[in-house]
Image (cartoon, rainbow, N blue to C red):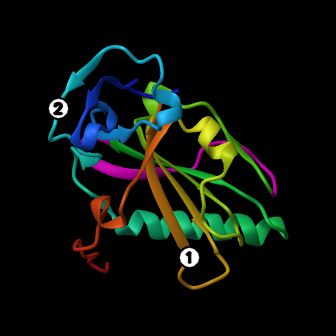
């Protein structure tokens, strides 16, 4: 359940492409609507210049939080003695990003984190694929439809894991580029 359920509208944009346009307090997006899902949609606003879009409305996420997330996922793998998936929330509150590892049931092929409440301030939901590549599975697509930024981390056995991010709502998805999400410039000052 999304902290801020997206409210939006359908647009007919560039090249007659149908888009679902919406915003949350964290980002705004225009998601392409697959042609097989477009049938029966009647309230469409013409916006000839509209193209698929992702725009973060808050500061980019410090890259250190992705490093912390990968460290937590590796810890789960090491302590589990086998391939396990896990989840992490990246939350935004009081103009700052922070990590939260929710209570969760984990297995080799699934992770079920506790439900998200408004008090969690979740903006990004990331799960691991352990040693497998990073990809969004059909199971992911069935559960990722409520206006969050979604991520998957895979290939955690390597020094440089694989990452995939996207936004999703109503069964429509748009990939998000790493540089549109993460702050590579911020420097950590050693203590």
Q: Quadrant of residue 61?
A: bottom left
Label 2 SS: loop
Q: Which mark is residue 47?
A: 2
Residue lying furthest bottom: 159
Q: Residue furthest front?
A: 15
Mark 1 or 2: the one toward you: 2
Q: Left or right of 32: which side holds 75?
A: right
The percent position of residue 30, horizontal first and vertical second, equals 30, 39
Task: Identify residue for label 1.
Answer: 161
Q: Earlier in the sequence, mark 1 or mark 2?
A: 2
**Where is residue 171 drawn, in percent x and y?**
52, 34
Q: Is residue 79 above or below residue 10?
A: below
Residue 104 belongs to the span the image colors magenta: yes
Residue 82 in the image: x percent, y percent? 84, 68
Q: Please check the rendered image and state whether residue 81 is part of the magenta-colored stretch, yes or no.
A: no
**Viewer-closest of 10 and 15:** 15
Q: Which residues are magenta?
A: 93-108
* Vertical order, 154 against 16 (above or below): below
Instruction: Specify whether residue 27 is in view.
Output: no
List x then y, in percent, for residue 114: 64, 35
Image point (14%, 41%), residue name: 49
Q: Secondary structure at mark 1?
A: loop
Q: As drawn, is 173 to the left or to the right of 176?
A: right
How many numbered discs, if any? 2
Residue at 52% across / 63% down in the picture? 69
In the drawing, does residue 132 fall left or right of residue 145? Answer: right
Q: Are marks 1 and 2 in contact (CB under 8 Å)?
A: no
């Amino acid at each position: 359940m999304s902290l801020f359920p997206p409210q939006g509208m359908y647009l007919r944009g560039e090249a007659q492409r149908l888009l679902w346009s919406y915003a949350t307090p964290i980002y705004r997006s225009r998601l392409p609507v697959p042609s097989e899902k477009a049938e029966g949609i009647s309230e469409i606003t013409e916006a000839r210049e509209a193209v698929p879009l992702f725009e973060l409305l808050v500061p980019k996420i410090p890259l250190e939080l992705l490093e912390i997330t990968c460290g937590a996922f590796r810890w789960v793998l090491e302590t589990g003695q086998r391939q396990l998936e896990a989840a992490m929330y990246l939350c935004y509150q009081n103009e700052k990003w922070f990590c939260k590892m929710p209570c969760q049931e984990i297995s080799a092929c699934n992770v079920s984190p506790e439900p998200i409440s408004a008090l969690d301030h979740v903006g990004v939901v990331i799960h691991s694929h352990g040693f497998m590549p990073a990809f969004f599975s059909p199971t992911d697509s069935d559960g990722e439809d409520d206006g969050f930024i979604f991520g998957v981390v895979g290939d955690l056995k390597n020094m440089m894991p694989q990452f995939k991010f996207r936004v999703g709502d109503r069964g429509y998805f748009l990939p998000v580029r790493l540089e549109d999400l993460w702050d590579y410039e911020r420097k950590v000052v050693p203590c």
